[in-house]
Image (spheres, rainbow, N blue to C red):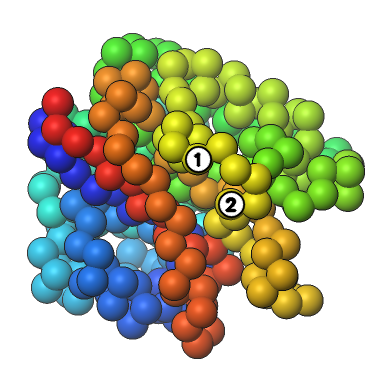
Amino acid sequence: MNRPFTLLTWNVNGIRARLDDVLSFLAEKSPDVACLQETKCEDKVFPRVPFAELGYTVHIHGAKGYAGVATLSKVKPTEVVTGFRGGDADSHCRILNTEIDGLRLYNLYVPNGTALGTEAFTYKLAWLARLKAELAEHYSPDTPVILCGDFNIAPDERDVVDPRALEGCTHFSPQEHAALRELLAFGLQDCFRKHDDRPGQYTWWDYRRGDFDRNRGMRIDHVYASAPLYARCESVVHDKTPRGWDAPSDHIPVIATFRGP
């Protein structure tokens, strides 16, 4: 965008189950753009009206079951692409690609991968490679691009509690790390790590075992930006407040602030 803006990304783990929480949070924080993942909601029943009442244009890509993404913007996008550009359609609703006031924004719910050696894991790696190929074909590293959402990958040892305990597991495997590095090699940088290099700054905690209270989580929700926007990123905040509410998502919102050009 050709002005200061704030961007929120949040895996809500079911928009209808968390609607009041999401609306309350957006009303308070009023980000310019909000990217929601795992909406678990068909487009025809997505609750558009309350978001429109907050001043957002609403674009959605969802279906029954898991996955689903929604991009809410106070500036109407000039282009909206659901899924990958061209070729065979993705079998799940995981990508909303919008252009908003000169900003190319990918709202992503990256596949989980289930377990190493499975078809789901192969699909995850191929999905990331296809996304990298799309970026390379349609944009340049000088394009103002942001990729945000639930990546289902913790990038390095600072982003997990115990790296050794995750050997042989998804979210922290060498294959996933290599796939993420290849994607970022397009010319993207981690906006959170621009401002905070501490370990233990997580965005997801299992509901079980009191993991949130013990801070046993992972940082898997990210904001990555190309050079023009990375330079403008002034802060990235992990807001834990909603995790303390009744029946919360297992992820927390991540809010990135960008200054004007």
Residue assigned mark 2: 201
Using the image, tell me which numbered label, if any, was put on residue 130.
Answer: none
**Residue 6 seen in this snapshot:** yes
Residue 169 vertical placement versus 142 (above, below): below
Comparing 181 with 96, the one in front is 181
Residue type of the residue flagged with mark 2: Gln
Asked if residue 168 lies left or right of residue 235, the reply is right
Q: How far apart are marks 1 and 2 (CA)?
A: 9 Å
Q: Given contact means CB atoms under 8 Å apart, are the residues at marks 1 and 2 in contact?
A: yes
Q: Position of residue 223 (x, y in %)?
A: 43, 40
Q: Could you classify mark 1 by the number of other residues whose Cα lies within 10 Å: few (under 14), some (14-19), or many (20 or more)?
A: few
| 1 or 2: tag closer to the N-terminus | 1
Residue 242 vertical placement versus 189 (above, below): below
Q: Quadrant for the N terminus, please.
A: top left
Question: Going 38% across and 58% down the picture, which residue do you hit?
Answer: 36
Residue type of the residue flagged with mark 1: Asp
Comparing 93 with 114, the one in front is 114
Residue assigned mark 1: 196
Using the rendered view, name the quadrant where residue 39 is placed: bottom left
- Under circle 2, the secondary element is loop
Question: Going 29% across and 13% down the picture, which residue do you hit?
Answer: 142
Asked if residue 70 lies left or right of residue 118, the reply is left
Q: Where is residue 14 in the image (x, y as percent from the top left)?
A: 47, 72
Q: Where is residue 143 in the image (x, y as percent from the top left)?
A: 27, 18
- Under circle 1, the secondary element is loop
Question: Going 43% across and 62% down the picture, which residue do you hit?
Answer: 239
